[in-house]
Image (cartoon, rainbow, N blue to C red):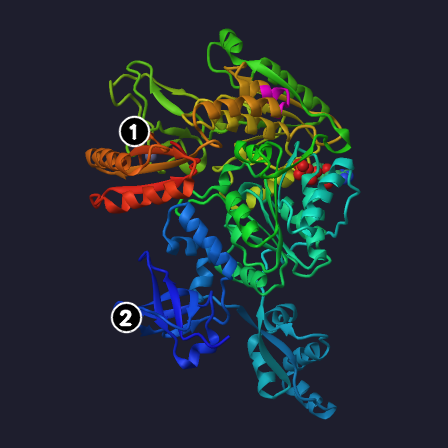
Amino acid sequence: MTNPSYVRVIIDRAIHRELDYAVPEGLMNRVGVGSRVRVPFREKSALATVVAVTEQSEAKGIRLIEAVVGEAPILSEQLLELGRWICAYYCCPIETVMRSLLPQVIRRAEVGWKKQLFVQPGRKIDNNELEKLRKRAPRQVELLETILRLEAPTRASQLLRQTSLDNQTLRALVKRGLVELREDAVIRDPHANEQFIATSNLILNQEQTHALKEITHALDSPEKSRRILLHGVTGSGKTEIYLQAIRAALDRGRTAIVLVPEISLTPQTVERFKGRFADVQDAVAVLHSHLSEGERHDEWHKIHSGRARIVIGARSAVFAPLKNLGLIIVDEEHETTYKQEESPRYHARDVAIVRAKIEKCVAVLGSATPSLESYHNAAIGKYQLVTLTQRIDEKQMPLMRVVDLRQERRKEKSATILSEKLRAAIADRLEKREQTILFLNRRGFSTSLLCSNCGEARNCPNCSVALTFHRHPAVAGRLSCHLCGHTAAVPKKCPACGKDALIYAGFGTERVESTVSQIFPKAVVRRMDADSMTRKEAYRETLRDFRTGRIDILVGTQMIAKGLHFPNVTLVGIINADLALHLPDFRAGERTFQLLTQVAGRAGRGETSGEVFVQTYTPFSPSIQFARHHDFSGYFQQELEFRERCDFPPFKHAVLITVRSAHEGRAKLSAETLQRRLKEALPQEFILGDATPAPLEKLQGQFRFHILVRGEAIIRLSRLVRETVDKLPFPEDVIVTIDVDPYQLL
Ligand code: ADP
Ligand code: ZN
């Protein structure tokens, strides 16, 4: 190839346009697609990514690029293509997509490798000189003798710590030429202090063997179906299949990405992967949101340079710059945390599918409760369906008992936290020294403060929700808003009517914890939710204490619902199964079914079989009944019929437009105007809803209006919506967001 004379770039700052620049001769052999460059833009200079190199350009008044940033191109053509797809599908500017494709620390190229000083022996010293020195400077000799005994260059800081000698002593030796210092890059490895015990392949059972064969077959036959939906009940050994499938990919000289929901990216999970590939040095890179900038820089380069061949990470790891990709695994593919709730609003599972297509590799989606979208894709033959029906060692699925809270209520008058049956079951487990998990997807102590006289609740001034009361020390005895963080003191009297009639209503995990502790004073009870897990190590410690049996009862939110594996847990109590069911969201039923099945999957993973108590006021709702009988296909059939009847996904794609402003009237007017324009712009085939107040009308001081559009041809719909929105001159304080395939409908 001749040297590029021109490049087309995307500037980091939002300008919605690609620009051409000329390349000065001196830089020609250093620029390629994916290079980072500094270019003159308007009066300043800006960072940009090269997306094409050409020998000609039609652009007028072309300017020269100023510099190349970093060494090599950092974005492959495939990833660039993926970025363009995201841009078109999710209806967002390419600069925004670029921010997801490349972590900030890489784009800026400001953070480099961590350099450290290493010590090694310098010139030879004879005995004579040594003895003279010993008399004059005994400490220098002490240090020198240690250094002469070193087998390899050692970090200066480490050496000084070990010998308790100081830097001055070292410098003196360097000055005499007896010791040399060398600067070298060290890797910031977040797992450096952990030991990973090497594990080897387990002998697969029949169903697993079949599943693995299908995946390796796909690896070996590039022309056949390359998307596999692995539907395996909880505890059926999906992870073991992933591990062996990755090994198969590595054996073929390929690499692999494993996506897991952030919430299940636990030390336990990482350990399993690091342990299995302990024989390949540096094989596994881990990407998640808690890495420091430096760690992220190092992990990214470890991947980019080809040293790491397996990447395990949350959502954004789908963009990991691996070369020769063979396999992308999306574990718990139904999880909604794969959807990014800020622009670009991509869904990592769907991006994984597209990336697999671009890279010509295999995608495996795994779940015990596949999303309706994926299961439908399997049903119509887009994905290949592989099922695992048995738990490992033929362990029984847990026994699900539904507790009708309406009857409990008649007995107790106030809302039931623990039904008699659940209480008895917990007592029984404590007796047998087995463990219990209690699940409630709501934080705090009580979820609203009501006036029993006038009925007024204490609401957040910025959001249309009630304030939650926390006992937790961080917000000690205050009311707080879970949406915007606003806190308020608890009033003595009702501010509305002045009566001393305030009562706490509704309950969250804090209340469950305290109730359980009262009923079972001898039991060790711990809570695990976003409030109790603010310290970084708290999560790890609690899990460890639970695993080693130091905790009898673990109370928590969805943080404990996923992927955890505790053999001694034989009882799971779902305190209120109705919480998700009554949300104004067409996926409410699906979520409830998934949640019940997943939480139930935490029970009976060891020798003893498990029992699950589902407390509910709607015992006959389909989600609860199908989950109770572990009947995925029955559930799937009826839910699918409902979706088809109502033109919801997976039959139609949805696009949710939110118009918001601190000024209610302007938000409403803008939404209505936009809705009228859409009516003109969209052909009949698309279903356009009215502009309506969002279920969560006010959030963080902003009034919100929704317009929902549905249709099959999603890329076309995205484009039409984008164009219509871009043409309208909205008032400055009105913000319009477009969410394609939305998951957050509130
Ligand atoms: P899933 O990911 O489907 O929930 P896991 O892969 O975590 O299931 O497997 C559940 C448990 O069974 C794990 O402890 C795992 O080590 C074990 N296991 C998986 N496959 C086998 C096998 N073939 N033989 C023995 N134990 C297995
Ligand atoms: Zn609020």
User: Is residue 130 rendered to the left or right of residue 505?
Assistant: right
User: Is residue 220 rendered to the left or right of residue 538?
Assistant: right
Of circles 2 and 1, the one toward us is 2
Residue lying farthest to the top in this orientation: 410
Q: Name the residue at 52% across, 7% down.
A: 411
Q: Earlier in the sequence, mark 2 or mark 1?
A: 2
Amino acid type, label 2: Lys
Q: Residues within 10 Å of mark 1 (few under 14, many from 20)?
A: some
Amino acid type, label 1: Asp
Instruction: Indicate which quadrant contains ligand 1.
Output: top right
Q: Is residue 191 above or below residue 212?
A: below
* Quadrant where the image shows the C terminus: top left
Separation (CA) of disc 2 from disc 1: 45 Å
Q: Give x and y (percent) for residue 141.
A: 67, 82
Residue lying farthest to the right in this orientation: 203
Residue 60, labelled with which disc?
Answer: 2
Q: Name the residue at 51% across, 75% down.
A: 1
Q: Is residue 313 visible?
A: yes
Q: Nearer the viewer, residue 8 or 441?
A: 8
Magenta region, residue range: 626-632
Q: Name the residue at 47% across, 41% down.
A: 339
